[in-house]
Image (cartoon, rainbow, N blue to C red):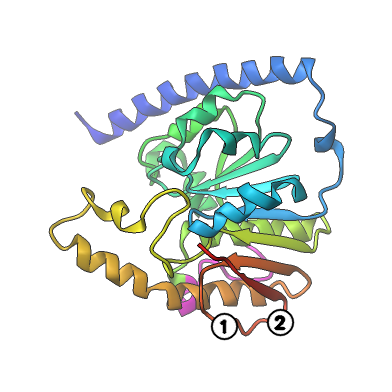
Amino acid sequence: MNTGIILRIRYCFYSSVGIISFALRKIFFSFYKFNKYKHKHNRIAVLGRGNSANKYFDQEYKLHSKVFIANYVNRDFIISDYLKILNKELVLVYNICEEIPYFLLLFFFIKINEIIISQSDKLISEGLRVSTRGSYRLNMFGVKVRGVRESEYINIFSNKREVTNITTGLYAIYEAAEFALRNNIFDISLYGFDLYSGPLNKNTVLRDEFDGKYTEDSDEYYWECREDYLALSKSLDYIISKYPKIFFSYHTTNPYEFKSDNIKKYNFEY
């Protein structure tokens, strides 16, 4: 079957589910008022999948009303974690594989404000004809899906070395910084961005992520990714340096020493 036809079938199916999801959420919100959504956000949390994300879920989830979540899948959540994102305004940031936690679809009382794919918004907005998306699963949430937008503060799609290796998680931090400046927010907390510096994800062993997905060289590729923590850290440092008005609290296992003055690192013990 033609790949274009498959994509159109997926688009129609997941978009239909999204219409139902949107309608149910509308009905729910009409009966229940989330007062926190009407308040000005004072600080933002951005959640990666590293082990240090547990700092947010175990201790600091009450500090934030706006939360960006990057590439979370089913195994990253335990049941109690869903309670920690209630009364939050959520932004979901995913790569084009769109491997999402389906359990979120049962929680129509969770406010998903925006969904972002880690590709250029210009490319995403061209639609099915020139699509780089693999499944359109994110359409199930009934929220408009967009790509990463350009900024006056940083050329996020340039050929600069610190930009070319930016991952989905770092795009989430970039988009959070952009939102913060537009809304006069100057405090962002980062959790779970260990950038392969440690052996653990939030709830799983990092090494297990590579089994079954790659060839017999999966162990070699795993160690290559672990070594990438330095390049990824430099990219994060570069992004942060472009937003000097924002203070970043960085909870992590990452040993990298940042050069930017507007970041404070808190070592996470596991």
Between the C-alphas of marks 2 and 1, the distance is 11 Å
Residue 30 in the image: above or below residue 71: above
**Can you give x and y, in whole percent of width and height, for residue 144 in the image?**
59, 35
Residue at numbered disc 2: 261
User: Image point 86% across, 46% down: which residue?
Assistant: 40
* 117 vs 110, nearest the viewer: 110
Q: Which residues are magenta?
A: 149-163
Q: Residue furthest left?
A: 216
User: Image point 63% across, 57% down: which residue?
Assistant: 175
Which quadrant of the view contains residue 241?
Answer: bottom right
Residue 245 in the image: above or below residue 181: below
Residue 169 as seen in the image, left or right of residue 200: right
Which quadrant of the view contains residue 107?
Answer: top right
Q: Nearer the viewer, mark 2 or mark 1?
A: 1
**Can you give x and y, in whole percent of width and height, for residue 77 in the image?**
50, 40
Please tell me the numbered disc located at residue 257: 1
User: Image point 48% across, 52% down: which residue?
Assistant: 202
